[in-house]
Amino acid sequence: MAWREVTGGSAVDIKKQGKGYQIEGIYKGYKKITTKLGEQWIYCIETEEGDVEFFGFAALNFKLGHIKEGANIRITYEGQFSVKNKFGKFPHMVKVEEDQGDGEEGGSETPF
């Protein structure tokens, strides 16, 4: 038999990776966990290097709620907004893009 060690979670906090950090691949869904701070979502994307799990946050949770499992997506962390929200915090911003399958970076124009 071949044994491998099973370790604790290896989820990435994309906010700590810095502005411009990207993850690209096939969206595999999410799981919910309960922490001392409350409910937390952990997302999974299958990349060329393997599966990457990462923690959700408000803007990311909202945007990924519109993506179906199996979609090819790219997530780019855009840093924090310069104005505080109603809770007195600077919210994190993220861009979520879904591949439309046209084969061209940035999309294509309508041919008419």
Image (cartoon, rainbow, N blue to C red):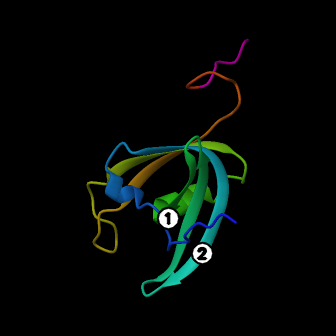
Residue 80, x across and y down, in percent: 31, 55
Whether residue 66 is visible, yes or no, is no
Q: Residue furthest bottom?
A: 36
Please name the residue that numbered disc 2 is placed on. Answer: 32
**Stretch in magenta:** 107-112
Q: Which mark is residue 101?
A: none
User: What is the count of numbered marks?
Assistant: 2
Question: Label 1 is placed on what type of residue?
Answer: Gly
Residue 36 lies in quadrant: bottom left
Q: Quadrant of the N terminus?
A: bottom right
In the image: residue 23, left or right of residue 71: left
Q: Decide whether residue 35 is among the magenta residues.
A: no
Mark 1 surroundings within 10 Å by alpha-carbon count, few (fewer than 14), some (14 through 19), many (20 or more): many
Residue 109 lies in quadrant: top right
Q: Quadrant of the C terminus?
A: top right
Mark 2 surroundings within 10 Å by alpha-carbon count, few (fewer than 14), some (14 through 19), many (20 or more): few
In this rendering, the answer to whether 25 lies above or below 4 is above
Residue 88, x across and y down, in percent: 28, 72
Front-lying residue, 39 or 28: 28
Q: Residue at x 50, y 58 (%)?
A: 60
Badge 2 element: strand
Q: Decide whether residue 111 is among the magenta residues.
A: yes
Q: Residue at x 54, y 63 (%)?
A: 61
Please name the residue that numbered disc 1 is placed on. Answer: 56
Look at the magenta stretch and give its main secondary structure. Answer: loop
Question: Label 2 is placed on what type of residue?
Answer: Lys
Q: Residue at x 34, y 71 (%)?
A: 86
Badge 1 element: loop
Residue 104, x across and y down, in percent: 62, 21
Whether residue 93 is visible, yes or no, is yes
